[in-house]
Amino acid sequence: MVKEEILKNIADCFEKAKDNKARNSMGNSENWYNSYYLVGKCFTTEELTEMSETELNNLIKFGDFASDVFY
């Protein structure tokens, strides 16, 4: 995925998260299972913008893995 698309997906996920009030059995927000949300909460917009396309793709890949493991 190209850098601009990743950054847009990260920015857009927060608007969608406002409407998602779902919680898992431990009471945590289901938004944490969204890789873009996870990465966007961990890093600032400035940090993400400075990252390369490869770094961003690797973070999303890791986020996908983490969300599968913890789900």
Image (cartoon, rainbow, N blue to C red):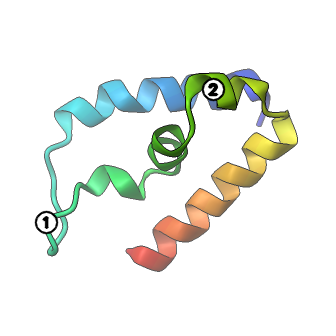
The mark that comes first in sequence, 2 or 1, is: 2
Residue 8: x and y in percent read 58, 22
The residue carrying mark 2 is 7
Disc 1 residue crowd, few under 14, some 14–19, many 20+, Cα 10 Å: few
Q: Nearer the viewer, residue 15 or 38?
A: 38
From the viewer's perspective, is residue 23 above or below residue 43?
A: below
Disc 2 residue crowd, few under 14, some 14–19, many 20+, Cα 10 Å: some
Residue 46: x and y in percent read 64, 22
Q: Residue at x 44, y 51 (%)?
A: 34
Within the image, what quadrant is residue 14 found in?
top left
The residue carrying mark 1 is 27
Q: Residue at x 23, y 55 (%)?
A: 29
Which residue appears farthest toward the bottom when viewing the image? Answer: 69
Quadrant placement of the N terminus: top right
In this rendering, would 35 be left or right of 24?
Answer: right
Indicate the amino acid at tag 1. Answer: Gly
Q: Residue at x 32, y 49 (%)?
A: 31
Secondary structure beneath label 1: loop
Residue 42: x and y in percent read 51, 45
Indicate the amino acid at tag 2. Answer: Leu
Quadrant placement of the C terminus: bottom left
Mark 2 and mark 1 in contact? Answer it, CB < 8 Å: no
Secondary structure beneath label 2: helix
- Label 2 vs label 1: CA separation? 28 Å
From the viewer's perspective, is residue 11 above or below residue 59?
A: above
Q: Residue at x 13, y 65 (%)?
A: 27
The numbered disc on residue 40 is none
Tag count: 2
From the viewer's perspective, is residue 31 above or below residue 52?
A: below
Residue 30: x and y in percent read 27, 56
